[in-house]
Image (spheres, grey):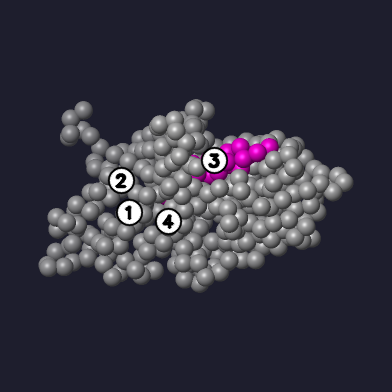
Amino acid sequence: MSASSAPPFDPRDPLGIDDLLDPEDLAIRDTVRTWAADRVLPHIADWYERGELPGVHELARELGEIGALGMSLTGYGCAGASAVQYGLACLELEAADSGIRSLVSVQGSLAMYAIWRFGSEEQKQQWLPRMAAGEAIGCFGLTEPDHGSDPAGMRTYAKKDGTDWVLTGRKMWITNGSVAKVAVVWAQTDDGIRGFVVPTDSPGFSAPEIKHKWSLRASVTSELVLDEVRLPADAVLPGVTGLRGPLSCLSHARYGIVWGAMGAARAGFEAALDYATSREQFGKPIGGFQLTQAKLADMAVELHKGILLAHHLGRRMDAGRIRPEQISFGKLNNVREAIEICRTSRTILGANGISLEYPVMRHATNLESVLTYEGTVEMHQLVLGKALTGLDAFR
């Protein structure tokens, strides 16, 4: 093909990545993009400034209506979308705000996924259709105040009392906690770590909301307190014992982050590109100066490399060939590069970059949380280090 017959260069899709998508992929992406533009973008700066996510139950029901909750799961009212389609949805949601993508990710990839993969048929029938419809919000209790990167050290304990289970402990930094109707809680037992499906109206369960956050402000974050919460025997997830359970859920959720981080990065890049072509200094748009063009070029390269990486991992997941180490590769690279893109965008916007009139600083501060949760930079480096060398440096 000659240069003259090639399609025109698109600054927002410079590699023509959209050519990798089929019509159904594009339809799902555009549905989520339109929903986010209508329901999130007009309000997100105000929600962020107030540190609130008002109408979260209504938002959840709307997300259920468009099939975004548990969308890569099959049956029980779930959409049965491909991994790539789920990733595209995560990208569009996080381009609006990381808090919105977190709501969807925790609901579908953590709480619903745990029940779908490890739950009994009764647990699935009781919860998954309502969760897929957004009628019941779920949360996922793994991290504790003193045990983040080392979940094997958790102190939350479940003991048998007759046929019942009694749970006692605390979980920390739990997205959706105070608005959830069901919590998937992981606890030590005499037989190893087990997961429990905990209705949040159970006596002894409380979820005080965490305030004074400077990141993920438009997201509900809570502590979970379990004070001798009594559950029936069938509350335990029967399909798994040990850390394999929660870690497989986290791997599924991290995959969504690989895509989502590129949504935040895209929002930062596009804000900088628009600003650079309209803001004038020294008699011309600042996009006409070499230093600004160098920044934009580097941002575009890292953004679209990251999207290609996400696509590659999505195709591997759809083919059943994905490994946890490969998801760590994507999470480590894409979140790290997304933060750098947003920080560079802020320099192009100058003082305006710190204003909520633009999305850049909001995305940059949100990404600081995304960098830490579901595996810190250091943990993913060690996962890859072990895979590369065969030597375990965790301890």
Judged from the image, the secondary structure of the residue bearing numbered disc 2 is helix
Q: Give the Cα separation between the discs numbered 2 and 4.
A: 16 Å
Would you call the spot at circle 3 few (<14 residues within 10 Å), some (14-19), or many (20 or more)?
A: many
Judged from the image, the secondary structure of the residue bearing numbered disc 4 is helix
**Which residue is labeled 4 in the image?**
367
**Which residue is labeled 3 in the image?**
252
Work out whether mark 2 precedes mark 3 in sequence or the reverse, and give the earlier one: 3
Judged from the image, the secondary structure of the residue bearing numbered disc 3 is helix
Residue 69 placement, left or right of 307? right
In the image, residue 143 lies at what x, y percent? Answer: 59, 53
Work out whether mark 2 precedes mark 1 in sequence or the reverse, and give the earlier one: 2
Residue 257 painted magenta? yes
Q: Residue at x 36, y 54 (%)?
A: 339
Work out whether mark 2 precedes mark 4 in sequence or the reverse, and give the earlier one: 2
The residue under label 3 is which amino acid type?
A: His
Report the disc number at residue 340.
Answer: 1
Q: Residue at x 41, y 42 (%)?
A: 381
Vertical placement of 116 versus 224: above or below? above
Residue 303 painted magenta? no
Instruction: Report the residue that reaches farthest toward the front.
Output: 395
Residue 256 placement, left or right of 296? right
In the image, residue 247 lies at what x, y percent? Answer: 57, 41
Would you call the spot at circle 1 few (<14 residues within 10 Å), some (14-19), or many (20 or more)?
A: some
The residue under label 2 is which amino acid type?
A: Glu
